[in-house]
Image: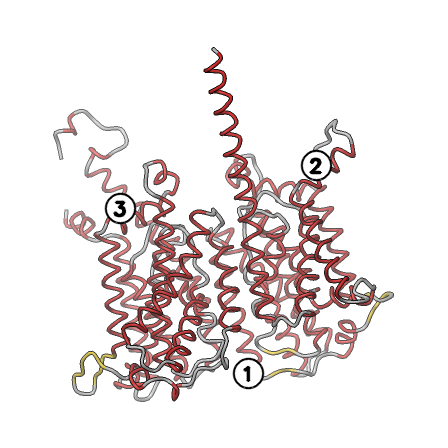
């Protein structure tokens, strides 16, 4: 009986997230013994700001993944918006911060909507569209008029300060504004995915596109919106990227789409759509950011092992999903069927009044 | 092949109206423009040169055609090129005999291909994710091997094979490409294995229930893809006479574009090596033409990306337009009949 109530209150996805949290804690404890001065506020700031940018991109990627699509252009969008806003700010120093943010988000959304139109209305597979736009947006960045480089010193004062602004500070411990923005994005989209009709429709479309279409869901509009939001979040991340690094070249955020996809997949979002959450993605991004930054500081192995380990991590995450979580899910469903005959495939007459 | 009663000229006309006919037209347009702008563009030496610049990608594109027709994808090929070149260069640098270094690199290609195949066929993960992980991980291994240096001491005979013509004006890589193209065409169109590649691509489940060993076919394809990618990596390093950790980075976009522009469906089950061959010719000449017009490599890649999207978008638009026209015609006919009765 206790097992049953436990099973009712916890879903397999939550067990997975719990495991991920435990792995992250284990990693932190492990690197704490390996890296000198690991538990310092400086390390925390470094790691948390790098996780922040990745998780904003990855949350957008999650929305697209939920609809059973991919967005491989986000790295180029982050790079382009960072470069675009950086260039604008170094020429027009009196652009207010809020307008700059809106410009970044708008540019990203515009690029995302181009993807969305082609995927949802042009019926071109997302992988083709975004492989193509990945190259196109990068080409736009390279060909952007100007001197191909943004320098921190040319930016207005507030932009130079942006990466050092704190939301709050307790003693040594600081929570940067960048991290605060990322947390806000994760919370907002977690709520959207859980409670808003739009969020639920993303899941419905991803778990069975055909059924969702037949059920009369505005399939095209929802997929389009998912791509626009993914682009907009990549734009926001581009702004954060610009603020964090200041000095930008044309290779800004090159390959970030791979990290974003990795974060999404490690965070438990299914590549077949319909399963996943913004919170899981935050955990995935945390794990990747943590590994990334910690391996840099770990003396025992060369930093060049980073990507090899990252690739392996993705495979393990997806494989464990396949093997463990799906088995758990079947187990859950089966026990649920035994408990409530009313939802069994062949209903009994008396069960209408029962349960 | 469907042997119908349609006459030969009629069949040729039908072919011209198909996607491949369109490609042929596009190819001729690009060729005409380029040769009008540049004297001696069509000379054998220029055409060979132009081919050689993209020969490794073209070789992999032939293999990728099999994979995509089969309903899978292999994004890890470019990283594997780097890994095989890196393995060979590093082993040779450490004093291994050149033959052993080359053999080890090719074996590694087989192993990595089998590794991809294992996750796809045995564990049952989508190949997009598996090979995306491969893309990251194999490139990561190159960094581990070579770090941020560049290796310029490669076996002399290998460089000679890569850079000097072997028969007439043709170097080894070009001969391999034409050899693979012919063998690949025969296997894909006329052998039982080729049929299975299509059948599985059209409907994996139906193929399995009909007794086709789906896993075996897919495994063979991924292993072959790994091997071809590592061979291409060696050829690439031999041609350049050097390698770095970023060797061949991002090549997968060009390769996949070559295949998809050739009329191969990303969902599997349809397409042919003829179309891919034509699209390779188009991309080569287009890139060359853009290079002659002083467009940067990144812009060229952008144009290729646009071409990739258009290659799927245009047929989609045409078919939906055609469907609308048919519906319209049927509607007017129904209205006319209703009026006359």
Q: Given the current orientation, which residue lies at the most extreme top position?
A: B341
Mark 3 belongs to chain: A
Crowd band around label 2 with a 10 angstrom C-alpha radius: few (<14), some (14–19), many (20+): few
Q: Are marks 2 and 3 in contact (CB under 8 Å)?
A: no
Residue B56 left/right relative to B218: right
- Pinpoint residue B236: horizontal percent, then vertical percent: 68, 70
Q: Regarding mark 1 in the picture, which secondary structure is present there?
A: loop
Mark 2 belongs to chain: B
- Pinpoint residue B137: horizontal percent, then vertical percent: 50, 68
**Up-down: is A169 above or below B48?**
below
- Pinpoint residue B208: horizontal percent, then vertical percent: 53, 39
What residue is pinned by disc 3? A332
How far is disc 3 from disc 1 in space, using C-alphas? Answer: 50 Å
What residue is pinned by disc 1? B148
Q: Nearer the viewer, mark 3 or mark 1?
A: 1
Q: Residue at x 35, y 61 (%)?
A: A60
Mark with earlier residue (1, 2) = 2
Residue B31 left/right relative to A15: right
How far is disc 2 from disc 3 in space, using C-alphas? Answer: 56 Å
Q: Regarding mark 3 in the picture, which secondary structure is present there?
A: helix
- Pinpoint residue B101: horizontal percent, then vertical percent: 68, 74
Q: Nearer the viewer, mark 2 or mark 3?
A: 2
Crowd band around label 1 with a 10 angstrom C-alpha radius: few (<14), some (14–19), many (20+): few
**B339 and B267: which is toward the camera:** B339
Q: Given the current orientation, which residue lies at the most extreme front position?
A: B339
Q: Are marks 2 and 3 on the same chain?
A: no
**A14 and A29: which is toward the camera:** A14
What residue is pinned by disc 2? B14
**Up-down: is B170 above or below A68?**
below
Q: Nearer the viewer, mark 1 or mark 2?
A: 2
**B331 and A160: which is toward the camera:** B331
């Amino acid at each position: 009986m206790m097992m049953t109530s436990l099973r009712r209150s916890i879903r397999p996805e939550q067990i997975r997230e719990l495991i991920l949290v435990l792995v992250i804690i284990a990693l932190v404890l492990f690197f704490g013994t390996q890296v000198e001065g690991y538990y310092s506020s400086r390390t925390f700031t470094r790691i948390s700001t790098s996780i922040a940018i990745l998780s904003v991109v990855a949350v957008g990627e999650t929305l697209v993944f939920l609809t059973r699509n991919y967005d491989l252009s986000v790295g180029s969008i982050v790079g382009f918006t960072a470069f675009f806003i950086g260039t604008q700010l170094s020429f027009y120093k009196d652009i207010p911060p809020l307008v700059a943010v809106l410009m970044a988000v708008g540019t990203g959304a515009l690029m995302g909507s181009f993807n969305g139109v082609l995927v949802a209305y042009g019926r071109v597979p997302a992988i083709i569209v975004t492989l193509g736009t990945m190259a196109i947006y990068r080409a736009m960045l390279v060909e952007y008029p100007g001197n191909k480089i943004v320098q921190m010193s040319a930016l207005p004062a507030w932009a130079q300060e942006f990466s050092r602004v704190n939301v709050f500070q307790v003693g040594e411990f600081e929570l940067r504004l960048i991290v605060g923005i990322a947390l806000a994005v994760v919370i907002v989209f977690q709520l959207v995915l859980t409670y808003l009709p739009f969020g639920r429709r993303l899941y419905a479309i991803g778990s069975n596109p055909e059924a969702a279409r037949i059920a009369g869901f505005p399939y095209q509009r929802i997929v389009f919106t998912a791509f626009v939001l993914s682009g907009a979040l990549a734009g926001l991340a581009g702004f954060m990227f610009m603020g964090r690094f200041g000095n930008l070249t044309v290779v800004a955020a090159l390959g970030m789409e791979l990290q974003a996809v990795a974060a999404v997949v490690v965070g438990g979002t299914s590549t077949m759509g319909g399963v996943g959450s913004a919170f899981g993605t935050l955990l995935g991004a945390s794990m990747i950011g943590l590994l990334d930054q910690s391996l840099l500081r770990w003396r025992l192995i060369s930093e060049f092992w980073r990507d090899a380990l990252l690739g392996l991590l993705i495979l393990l995450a997806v494989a464990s999903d396949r093997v463990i979580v799906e088995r758990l899910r079947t187990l859950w469903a089966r026990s649920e069927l035994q408990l409530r005959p009313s939802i069994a495939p062949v209903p009994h007459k008396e069960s209408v009044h029962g349960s | 092949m469907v042997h119908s009663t349609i006459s030969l000229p009629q069949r040729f006309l039908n072919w011209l109206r198909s996607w491949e006919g369109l490609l042929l037209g596009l190819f001729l347009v690009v060729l005409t423009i380029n040769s009008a702008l540049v004297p001696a563009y069509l000379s054998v030496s220029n055409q060979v040169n132009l081919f050689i610049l993209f020969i490794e990608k073209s070789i992999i594109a032939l293999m990728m055609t099999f994979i995509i027709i089969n309903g899978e994808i292999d994004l890890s090929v470019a990283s594997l090129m780097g890994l095989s070149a890196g393995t060979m260069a590093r082993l040779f640098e450490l004093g291994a005999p050149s033959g052993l270094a080359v053999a080890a690199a090719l074996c590694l290609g087989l192993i990595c291909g089998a590794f991809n195949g294992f996750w796809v066929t045995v564990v049952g993960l989508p190949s997009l994710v598996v090979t995306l992980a491969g893309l990251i991980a194999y490139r990561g291994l190159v960094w581990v091997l070579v770090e941020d240096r560049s290796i310029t001491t490669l076996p002399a005979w290998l460089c000679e094979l890569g850079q000097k013509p072997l028969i007439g004006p043709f170097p080894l890589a070009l001969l391999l490409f034409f050899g693979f193209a012919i063998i690949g065409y025969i296997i894909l169109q006329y052998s039982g294995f080729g049929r299975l590649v299509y059948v599985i691509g059209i409907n994996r489940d139906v193929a399995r229930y009909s007794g086709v060993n789906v896993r075996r076919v897919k495994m063979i394809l991924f292993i072959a893809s790994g091997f071809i990618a590592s061979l291409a990596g060696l050829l690439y390093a031999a041609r350049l006479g050097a390698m770095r950790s970023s060797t061949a980075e991002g090549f997968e976009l060009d390769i996949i574009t070559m295949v998809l522009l050739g009329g191969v469906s990303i969902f599997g089950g349809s397409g042919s090596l003829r179309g891919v061959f034509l699209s390779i010719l188009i991309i080569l000449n287009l890139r060359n033409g853009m290079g002659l017009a002083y467009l940067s490599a990144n812009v060229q890649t952008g144009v290729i990306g646009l071409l990739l999207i258009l290659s799927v978008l245009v047929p989609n638009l045409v078919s939906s337009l055609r469907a609308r026209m048919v519906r319209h015609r049927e509607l007017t006919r129904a209205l006319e009949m209703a009026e006359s009765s």
